[in-house]
Amino acid sequence: MVSKEEVKQTAEMCKLKLSQEETDIFIAMFSNVLEQVEKLNTVDTDGVEALNFLNLKEKSLREDIVEDSLNREEVLKNAPEQEYGYFKLLRVMD
């Protein structure tokens, strides 16, 4: 089961403000996902060859087209934190 503290910590890292009701909903949803993943651990995969790729078809890519981009100041005005003209993010790795 996922704890209330884990949901709050995850929401804080994602810059989300959750109500108590939303926190309870996320606890139930995350716990359900973890239960489903745990069920996958019980599947017998002995003798099953690993799947390395899903599609052998040639991928068609569109040609890159240079277009106008958004103004930096306008983009950053919605950022919760910014520094040196860029988004400031939480450090996720040491």
Image (spheres, rainbow, N blue to C red):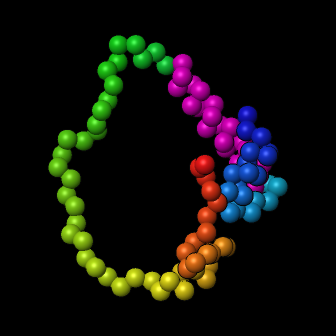
Residue at 67% over, 73% down: 80
The N terminus - image quarter: top right
- Residue at image point 22% right, 66% down: 62
Residue range corresponding to the magenta coloring: 22-42
Q: Does the magenta run of residues contain 28?
A: yes
- How many numbered discs, if any? 0
In this rendering, the answer to whether 72 lies above or below 6 is below
Nearest the viewer among 71 and 33 is 71
Residue drawn at x 74%, y 45% is 6
Name which quarter of the figure residue 32 lies in: top right
Q: Residue furthest right?
A: 20
Does residue 61 appear to the left or right of 17 in the view shown? left
Return the residue found at the far left. 58
Secondary structure mostly seen in magenta is helix
- Say if 86 sits above or below 57 in the image: below
Residue 25 in sight here? no
Estimate the x, y position of residue 79 in percent, counting from the top left.
62, 75
Position in image of residue 64 (x %, y %):
24, 71
Image coords of residue 35 (percent x, y): 63, 31
**Where 92 sits versus 86, above or below?**
above
Q: Is residue 50 above or below residue 79?
A: above
Residue 7 visible somewhere in the drawing: yes
Q: Which residue is painted at 22% across and 61% down in the image?
A: 61
The question of residue 15 being in magenta is answered with: no
